[in-house]
Amino acid sequence: MESRRLFFDIVGRLSDLPQVNMIRCGIWKPRTHPGGFEGLGEEALRWVDEARQHYPTLRFCCEVANPTHVEAALRHGIDAVWIGARTTGNPFSMGELAESLRGCRLPVLVKNAPAPDVEPWMGAIERLLSVGIGEIMAVHRGFSTYNAGDLRNDPLWQIPIELHRRMPDMPLLCDPSHIAGHRDKVAQIAQMALDMGFDGLMVECHPSPEDALTDASQQLTPDALAAMLSHLSLRQDDADKAERLLHNLRSRIDEVDHQLLALLQERMQISREIAQTKSENNISIVQNSRWDYVLNSRMMAARKMGINEGFVKEVFEKIHAESVRVQVEGD
Ligand code: PEP
Ligand code: MN
């Protein structure tokens, strides 16, 4: 929210889109470096108040990072709040925020923390559950990793999938803007999220993206947002149909997984025998040249077999780490 005119312009245009039921309002903006636009604060909340009278079917939500934000947002009748990635990752901030929200009926959206780990996300949600927040939604905004390729944040889909496994009733939204980092890639990330069964999207939108005071490269115009929403396809989630169609393939996966486990068991047994021989002959556990050979040869084989090399590298690093652990600890 950069000015009253800009805000009413965008809300007016988004109110025509049937898929939009909540407006994300940038009231307080966390910035990595000092000196940037940090939002207009309470002044902008007054425009939200006004907009709610004009557009009674729309809901308005904003980020809150401390109890002062919560109090101001509540005073101005905000419909929902979200907790930003950097706040989610801070247990002290989460404790204070949860306390200030105790007894509120407000829905709270919780973005994942930047670290590629499900635990801080889960912990933040638990703090909100413990003060009785009834409606919580998780928002997947990708993770800060050393190399996210051509995206801004690494999606690491397995982490939101794990959260969903642990908390199956909690709605899961995706923020494709912060994952993509660039407007050209927002639609493709949004479609992936919907294909995986996410329940909704949080998308950044600005009438003239190039001039936006924050995250200019990832903002979509209202027209681009409308086009994206009309092109996205939704899959029907029908567990019976999935079971009927996938029964045979799922049985084969089950069989292959059992074979993988049996092979891993056999490999660990061989490792124990190696450990025994090394110990009896005073040979050190990690032999660098051997590990180098194992990793390189497996990756080369993976390439020939058309399996993703990075994936195979990670699998063998995990297997090797476990093998070393067993050799060191004995089981
Ligand atoms: C935002 O939603 O504008 C934002 C700052 O995102 P995040 O908390 O995911 O970094
Ligand atoms: Mn942003």
Image (cartoon, rainbow, N blue to C red):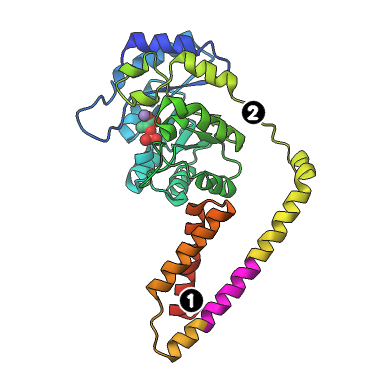
Image point (54%, 59%), residue name: 301
Percent x, y for residue 183?
Answer: 43, 25
Residue 194 seen by the camera: yes
For mark 1, give the secondary structure: helix
For mark 2, give the secondary structure: loop
Other-residue count near label 1 (Cα within 10 Å), few / some / many at <14 / 14–19 / ≥20: some
Image point (49%, 59%), residue name: 299
Magenta stretch: includes residue 237: no
Numbered badge on residue 234: 2
Which quarter of the figure has residue 81?
Answer: top left
Specify the farthest residue to the bottom: 280
Percent x, y for residue 265?
Answer: 61, 72
Magenta stretch: includes residue 266: yes
Position of 36 relative to 121 (above/below): above
Report the span colored magenta: 261-273
Specify the farthest residue to the left: 35
Image point (51%, 27%), residue name: 187
Question: Circle 1 is placed at which residue position?
Answer: 326
Position of 75 relative to 235 (above/below): above
**Could you tell whether 244 is left or right of 265 in the image?**
right
Judge: label 2 CB < 8 Å from ligand 1: no
The picture quadrant for ligand 2 comes to top left
Specify the farthest residue to the right: 244
**Could you tell whether 115 is left or right of 322 in the image?**
left
Position of 167 relative to 31 (above/below): below
Residue 317 seen by the camera: no
- Toward the viewer: 84 or 205? 205
- Toward the viewer: 215 or 283? 283
Question: What amino acid type is highlighted by mark number 2?
Answer: Leu
Question: What amino acid type is highlighted by mark number 1?
Answer: Val
